[in-house]
Amino acid sequence: MNLEFLTVSLLVVASPGTGAAVAIATGLSRGARKAAVAALGCTLGILPHVLAAVTGLAALLHASALAFEVVKYAGVAYLLHLAWLTWRQQGVLKIEPDGAGRSRASNWQVVRHAVLVNLLNPKLSMFFLAFLPQFIARDEPAPTLAMLQLSALFMAMTFAVFALYGAFAARLRERVLGSPRAMAWLRRGFAAGFVALGAKLALATR
């Protein structure tokens, strides 16, 4: 396995972004198990980008300014929606005491939020279009299979890193829940973080 691919992929996965923010916020609000579910959702949200890169749809997204802008601003709108829900203490990112409201935040809801965060990020398609082919040998007899194998490895790393982020956040959960002031600041911080990530995505170019 290409060590360079593993190193670069780890750096990309571990760098701060929307998926990491969702995993951490879920760990704080719902605990380690729900954080793992969020990590799974973020990982599943990568699948459409992988398929787009393999089938050539990512190249179309790269070539079409309109398609890129539509997906980009849909992602921006969803991040702002998450920021609003977090600020208003609503949705699956609401921080509550143990056992409170867990029936309202089902695994499906957590997965759905996490999937949408990564699904509506056109930069992921650009990443797979520009990044993965660099690690496919020119004489590779089955380039599509090789790309799928590397994509699967990238997704496995994504799940592992995001689950670790969420588990670490869950360990801080008791201290956070014991301080209403800390809870308020965390809620505001994550809301501001989602706004900042939305702004960063809005400024993204092809």
Image (cartoon, rainbow, N blue to C red):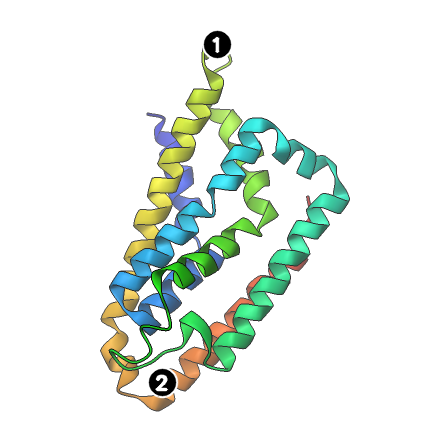
Specify the label residue 182 is tagged with: 2
Specify the label residue 198 is tagged with: none
Q: Amino acid at mark 2?
A: Ala
* Image-based side of 187 in relation to 179, left or right: right
Q: How far across and how far down the image is residue 60, in percent?
A: 69, 34
Q: How far across and how far down the image is residue 76, in percent?
A: 62, 61
Q: Amino acid at mark 1?
A: Asp
> Mark 1 or 2 closer to N-term?
1
* Image-based side of 179 in relation to 72, left or right: left
Element at badge 1?
A: loop
Find out whether the residues at labels 1 and 2 contact each other: C-beta distance under 8 Å. Answer: no
Element at badge 2?
A: helix
Check the image and report above or below for 117 versus 125: below
Q: In whole angstroms, how far apart are the C-alphas of marks 1 and 2?
A: 56 Å
Name the residue that disc number 1 marks. Answer: 139
Q: How far across and how far down the image is residue 8, in percent?
A: 42, 38
Rate crowding at label 2 as few (under 14), some (14 to 19) or many (20 or more) other CA atoms within 10 Å: few
Rate crowding at label 1 as few (under 14), some (14 to 19) or many (20 or more) other CA atoms within 10 Å: few
Is residue 46 visible in the rendered structure shown here? Answer: yes
Q: How far across and how far down the image is residue 48, in percent?
A: 52, 40
